[in-house]
Image (cartoon, helix red, strand yellow):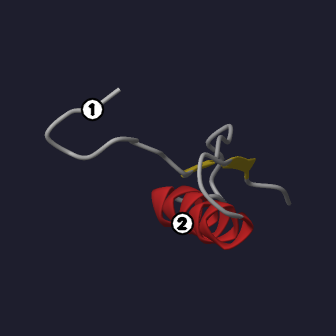
């Protein structure tokens, strides 16, 4: 398939989820997702990595 972006579009994503508590902040959630995204990018294209604790 050809399109304006090029022949292929790929995505790498980092996913994090948490149940809010008084000791876990939104910053923790974003940091976990960012770290998962970095791991996805390191593995290669078209990757989805879940954050783990």
Q: Residue furthest left?
A: 4
User: Seen in the image, is 53 located left or right of residue 2?
Assistant: right
Q: Which mark is residue 52?
A: none
Tell me which corner region of the image, top left, top right, bottom left or bottom right, holds residue 35.
bottom right
Mark 1 or mark 2: which comes first in sequence? 1
| Mark 2 surroundings within 10 Å by alpha-carbon count, few (fewer than 14), some (14 through 19), many (20 or more) | some
Q: Which residue lies at the image location 68% right of the left edge and 73% below the top edge?
A: 42
Single out the residue that lies furthest toward the right.
53
Residue that numbered label 1 is attached to: 2
Secondary-structure class at tag 2:
helix
SS of the residue under disc 1 = loop
The residue to which callout 2 is attached is: 34
Picture quadrant where residue 51 is located: bottom right
What percent of the width, then of the height, locates residue 5?
21, 45
Total of numbered circles in the picture?
2
Image-quadrant location for residue 53: bottom right
What's the residue at 26%, 46% (across, down)? 6
Quadrant containing the N terminus in the rendered view: top left
Q: Residues within 10 Å of mark 1 (few under 14, many from 20)?
A: few
Specify whether 46 is left or right of 7.
right
Q: Nearer the viewer, residue 38 or 8?
A: 8
The answer to whether 47 is drawn above or below residue 35 in the figure is above
The Cα atoms of the two marked residues, 1 and 2, are separated by: 31 Å
Q: Nearer the viewer, residue 25 or 48?
A: 48
**Nearer the viewer's eye, disc 1 or disc 2?**
1
Q: Nearer the viewer, residue 10 or 8?
A: 8
Residue at screen point 60% across, 67% down:
41
Report the residue at 60% width, 46% height from top.
46
In screen coordinates, is 7 left or right of 22? left
Q: How far across and down, in percent of the image, does residue 4 sit?
A: 13, 40
């Amino acid at each position: 398939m050809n399109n304006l972006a090029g022949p292929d579009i790929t995505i790498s994503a980092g996913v994090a989820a948490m149940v809010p508590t008084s000791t876990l902040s939104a910053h923790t959630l974003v940091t976990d997702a960012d770290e998962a995204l970095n791991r996805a990018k390191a593995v290669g294209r078209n990757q989805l990595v879940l954050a783990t604790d």
